[in-house]
Amino acid sequence: MFRYEFMRNAIIVSALISVLAPSIGIFLVLRRLSMIGDTLAHASLAGVTLSLVSARNPVVGAFVFTAVCGGFIELLRTRFRKNADLILPIILAFSVGIAITIMSSGRLRVNADSFLFGSILTVTRTDMALVAALGVISVLTVVFLYHRLIYIAYDEEAAAIAGVRVRIINYVFMVLSAAAVSVTIRIVGVLVISSMITLPVATALQFEGGFKRTLILSVIFSVIYIMAGLVLSYYLGVAPGGFTALVSVAGIILIIMGKKVHKHAIRALKRAG
Amino acid sequence: MIRAKELHFSYTGTAPYILNGIDFEMLAGEYISVVGDNGSGKTTLMRLILKMIKPGTGSIASSAQRTGYVPQRNSGADSGFPITVHEMLNSYRKLLKVPDKNAVRENLKLVSMSGFENALTRTLSGGQSQKMLIARALMGEPDLLVLDEPSTGIDSASREDIYRILKALNQTKGMTIISVEHNLRAAVSNSSRIYHLSGGRGHICTPEQYVAEYMNRPGEFGDV
């Protein structure tokens, strides 16, 4: 499969996504903001359709529109704390509304299905360059803000007292989330983005380690899930998004079961000893 | 160290005020316990000292170079957040830009928590968790330490340990301490002065005066 250029592009893009998605995902999961990932995924679909209808690059369009929505979510979350749970459904409905209206209007000359389900055939060199640029900038920003992001997730009040500019970093984090979502959309598609951001982290959390260990394990599981999904979907001739999600779910179930078996085995050994 | 003048505060910005004309002065090296009934404004006063909120009218100023803060309960510690004691303290050290890498180990030693570096924070007992938060607050070598009910939900042995640490910090290191207290016995035995809040107003007195004035009230010492 490596003799095809589209497959090589897809593997490079997947490798970048495998690192970026859990690096952002771990903070989303630990701050209990997984639903934001889902909302941003739908916002990215609106961005894609808006770009396609105006003949612009869909990855750029997805990033810009998702970043604007992310910033708007953060603004509304801080202004209307009591109604924070209503903000996400409003942004989600707005985004899905735009996407469906454009897709059903017949004005799209390109098939938007590849953005819904993910595709390895349509990853162009331009896409690859954009994904690489967004991915590298985002990962470097996470590295730069690492301790501040940990503290905002762990204890926002203590972070503020230590002089962290919590509000500004929350906006930056929304832009990073938007970047992670818009680059992931290319391979796995809108429908399973939030799973790809959260499932490797959820798997890593089963190992009950410290933060650094959990982050490293999240990246390892992300690489395994995305690469396995990509390769298997190629041989099975199915969309990579759906199959990557299935591989991830199988992975986390196996780990949870393995953990239970391990616990029972230790208990049995203790009883025998 | 801290001076409040005609301080008024309410969360709505209008009357009725939680703090209704507070005049308060704390000198460097003092250990003051702030006591009062639930809803008397103890935590609000602490939040004003920490500049987490701004006064409605009047003023409150602190001349502390660095302020350490020990919260009542740490939300992150209970949420299953995957972080070790070392990671938690070391990240805080980085936020405060403290260059000394040994600060984590030294502060853990100061609160008798050496050997807990690799423990996950969520596995700590209430007393250990509180001591870890004191170690965190000491990270920037503060000259003012603000605590919010440091012994709530903690067993008696750990409670004694915590007050021993606080007293040592105050008496041997000269650290100024202001602690919102629910534990009146601890307030009386450790503080140099007690600030009693009631009906939005405050009254400062020595521990002896406080005992003479309040100890005969039924239930006042019943929970300690």
Image: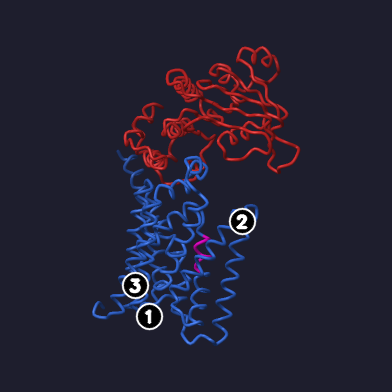
Q: Residue at the spot x=45%, y=76% of the render? A: A58
Query: What's the residue type where badge 1 is placed?
Result: Thr
| Residue A84: mark | 2
Label 1 to label 2: alpha-carbon separation: 37 Å
Circle 2: element type:
helix
Expressed as whole percent of the image width and height from the top left, the position of residue B109 reads 36, 28
Q: Are marks 2 and 3 on the same chain?
A: yes
- Residue A122 is tagged as 1
Determine if marks 3 and 1 fall on one subunit. yes
Q: What mark, if any, has residue B183 been given in the picture? A: none
Disc 1: host chain: A
What x and y, as percent, mark residue A51? 49, 78
B50 horizontally vs B21: left or right: left
The C terminus of chain A - image quarter: top left
Chain whose colour in the figure is red:
B
Instruction: Describe residue B152's horizontal placement relative to residue A80 as left or right.
Output: left
Q: CA distance from mark 2 to mark 3?
A: 36 Å
Query: Dot 1, how many residues are within 10 Å of its Cα: few (below 14), some (14-19), or many (20+)?
Result: some
Please say if B25 is above or below A18.
Answer: above
Q: Position of residue A264 (x, y in %)?
A: 37, 47
Q: Are marks 1 and 2 on the same chain?
A: yes
Quadrant of the image containing the N terminus of chain A: bottom left
Of the pair A229 and B66, the residue shown nearer to us: B66
* Amino acid type shown at disc 3: Ala
**Residue farthest left in this picture:** A3
Query: Which colour is chain A painted?
Result: blue
Span colored in magenta: A35-41
According to the picture, the residue beneath numbered tag 3 turns out to be A129
- The secondary structure that dominates the magenta segment is helix
Q: Earlier in the sequence, mark 3 or mark 1?
A: 1
Residue B153 figure quarter: top right
Judged left or right of residue B87, residue B51 is right
